[in-house]
Amino acid sequence: MIKVALIGAGKMGISHLSILGAHPDVQITGVSDTSKMVLDVFKKFTTFPGFTDYEQMLNEVDADAVFVAVPTKFHASMIRKVLEKGKHVFAEKPFCLSVEEGKELVEMAAARKLVNQVGYHNKFVGTFRELKRIVQGGYLGELFHFTGEAYGPVVIRPKQGNWRADPAEGGGCLMDYASHVIDLINDTVGPIQKVKGAVLKPLFSKSVDDSVSSLLELSNGLSGVLLVNWSDITYRKMSTSITVQGSKGKIICDANELKVYFNSNEFPEGYSKGWNVKYVTDLTDPVAFYLRGEEYSSQVDYFIKAVQGKVPNTINSFQSAWHTDKVISLIKQSANQ
């Protein structure tokens, strides 16, 4: 059994805790949160030891791994403490508020040979995994252009006083939502190397951006566009998509379906020349415990298997999340020029 402790019992923390609690190879040994009310609920309905001080929990409970699900501004200090204790770490996204802090944690985890993962769950969505297979398999030929997009109704009226409106808390569309798209582009199309221009625009917020537009260039010279707006009321919920066009076809992919056009006779098995449509249900393996989407259980299961040594620690590592942080920093720099 892998013994796991959790720091942060908010929305994502409780989601992770539910999935961990149902995992056959996991024993939850402690939960830390600053809210006494939350801990009182855990005390009443669970057997998990509860702590308001996460350092006390790290000192007193037996844990092989720790899930860190707290606001981004606390990531660097808390993850550093967990690594110093020799524990494997799963952290929520985005990774860190500064590139320098992220670099330190990447090096610490590597030096201590500890499994590390960041919760960019889209990499575990079946359609996006298939997008990566088709693009990196060369089935689209020479790539011409890509677009990464995300739209939704997260901030649709003037509202202050919560973390989404505070840049020091990791708030803003770029940090919270565009980070998902940037991470997907890095993983599926190629690593982003340069930011050729960027506009960060507040629509309802006063101190953070609600809309992100940027021209990106990959390490192979391919250019593309990033467009993210979390103040779009024409969407029922956030919708993330990647479009890639090449000499042999075009692919349009979101979390629900993948549409791909092949203009040659070279295509993967199960496809044909012309338009093809695959749905996420066709491309997703079943999970033992479903909550919010298979990808959430899949990422937790992958982390546990990595701790067990059953899979390599290569998906959503600190290293890849740090690269996403670096692109976020480049976009901020470009927007401020």
Image: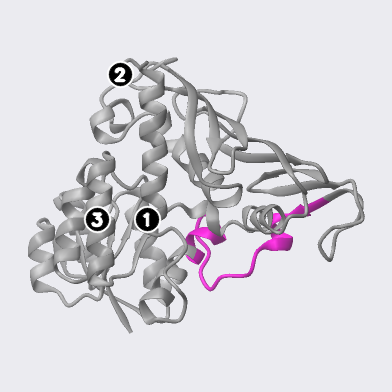
Mark 2–mark 1 distance (CA, rounded to whole Å)? 29 Å
**Residue position for label 3:** 105
Q: Give the label on residue 207, or none.
A: 2
Q: Which mark is residue 214?
A: none
Classed neighbour count for the residue bearing mark 1: other residues with Cα under 10 Å, few (<14), some (14–19), many (≥20): many
Q: Position of residue 181 (x, y in %)?
A: 52, 40
Secondary structure of the residue carrying numbered label 2: loop
Q: What element carries label 3?
A: helix
> As rendered, which of 317 and 2 lies closer to the eye?
317
Height in image: 103 above or below 160?
below
Q: Do the residues labelled 3 and 1 touch (CB within 8 Å)?
A: no
Quarter in which the N terminus is drawn: bottom left
Q: Looking at the image, is mark 2 or mark 1 earlier in the sequence?
A: 2
Residue at the extreme bottom:
1
Is residue 38 found left or right of 155 in the rendered image? left
Give the amino acid at mark 3.
Answer: Leu
